[in-house]
Image (tube, grey):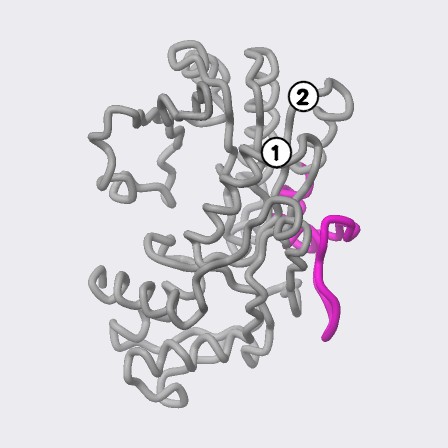
Amino acid sequence: MEEKSESITKVVNLDALTYAGTLDNTKDFEDNKKYFFEKVDLRDTARLWSVFVRHQLTHVVHLAAESHVDNSIEDPGAFITSNIVGTHNLLKLAREFGVQRFHHVSTDEVYGELGDTGKFDENTPYDPRNPYSASKASSDFLVKAYFHTYGFPITISNCSNNYGPRQHDEKFIPTVIRSIVGGKKIPLYGQGLNIRDWIYVKDHCEGIWKVALEGELGETYCIGADCEKKNIEIINILCKELSVVPEESLEYVKDRAGHDYRYAIDNKKIKEKLGWSPQTSFIDGIKQTVKWYNEKY
C-alpha cells in the first residue's frame, strides 16, 4: 500500500493463489484504477523485490498465511515455509526498501488455551499448541525482533476467530452451512463444547486499518468482539437460520489432536487507545454470512 498525505494512491494485493486463494473475492473492485494485483509467493524474494520497486510501496499489511489447523497437523512443513520463512522475506525486503510502516496480522491461537475464565490480552505469555499456532508465534517474534533490533516500524494485531462472506470452504462456519445446504451430515469434533470468540470479518478489517495507520509503533493490539460461543451453539444457530433440526444433522467425529478448549480476547486496549469497537452483532453477521453462502452453494 502506498500512502501520501493521508490519502491512498494505490492498493497492491499480493497473493500466491494457493488452494485457498481466489480472484473471485476481488471482482467487485478489480477494475478500480487504484487497485493492482500481483501473483507472488513470499518465498520468491526476487519477484517480491520487483513488486516493491515497481509500485514504490510505503506501507505493508501482512495477512498472508497458511491457517488451517488440521492441515498443519498433517503437514507442518508448508506452515514453516509460508508463515515463518515467508514472513521473514517480507520483513527483510520491506526494511531494505524503507517502508514507513509494517503491520503484521496474527491470531489469538499463539496464546494457547484458556480455562473457563479469563481472557487473552497483549501481555499474555505465548503458548502455541499446534504447528499452525507455533508458526504464527514464530512470525510474531520475528516481527518484534525487527522492531527491537533494527528500529523497524511495526505493529501487530492478534485476532479472534473470523466469520463472514468469502471465507474458504474448509473453515468451520462455511463447512456447517455447506453441509446443511447439501443435505449432508455436519461434522462435529468431540461434543462441540470448545469455545471460540467470534468477530465479523468487516469489523476485523476495520480494526486492522486502525492499527496499521494509527497504532503505536512496536505495539501489539488484540482484536475481538466479546462474542464467545461453543461450537455446538454455532451449529444450532445455523440450523435455525436454515430451518433444519440439529439433532438429525450431526455427525460426531474424532476430536482434533491438541484441540484447544477455549479462546477469548480482551479488546480493551484497542478500544481505549484507538477508538475501535465491533459494530456487527453476531446474529446480524450470521444472517449476512448465511445469505452469501446459501447463494454460493
Quadrant location of the C terminus in the rendered image: bottom left
Looking at this view, is 93 or 103 the one in front?
103
Q: Looking at the image, which residue is at 23% across and 41% down?
A: 28
Specify which label sits upstream in the sequence, 1 or 2: 1
Q: Looking at the image, which residue is at 44% across and 27% down?
A: 41
Q: Which residue is mark 1?
A: 84
Give the x, y percent position of residue 113: 70, 62
Quadrant location of the N terminus in the rendered image: top left
Query: Is 294 a magenta residue?
Result: no
Q: Main secondary structure of the magenta part?
A: loop
Question: How many C-alpha atoms fall within 10 Å of the one at disc 2: few (<14), some, or many (≥20)?
Answer: many
- In this rendering, position of residue 140 left or right of residue 183: right
Q: Looking at the image, which residue is at 46% across and 53% down?
A: 203
Give the x, y percent position of residue 232: 50, 79
Looking at this view, is 247 or 125 the one in front?
125
Q: Secondary structure at mark 1?
A: helix
- 40 in relation to 126, above or below: above
For the record, the magenta segment spans 109-138
Q: Secondary structure at mark 2?
A: loop
- 270 in relation to 177, above or below: above
Q: Looking at the image, which residue is at 77% across and 53% down?
A: 124
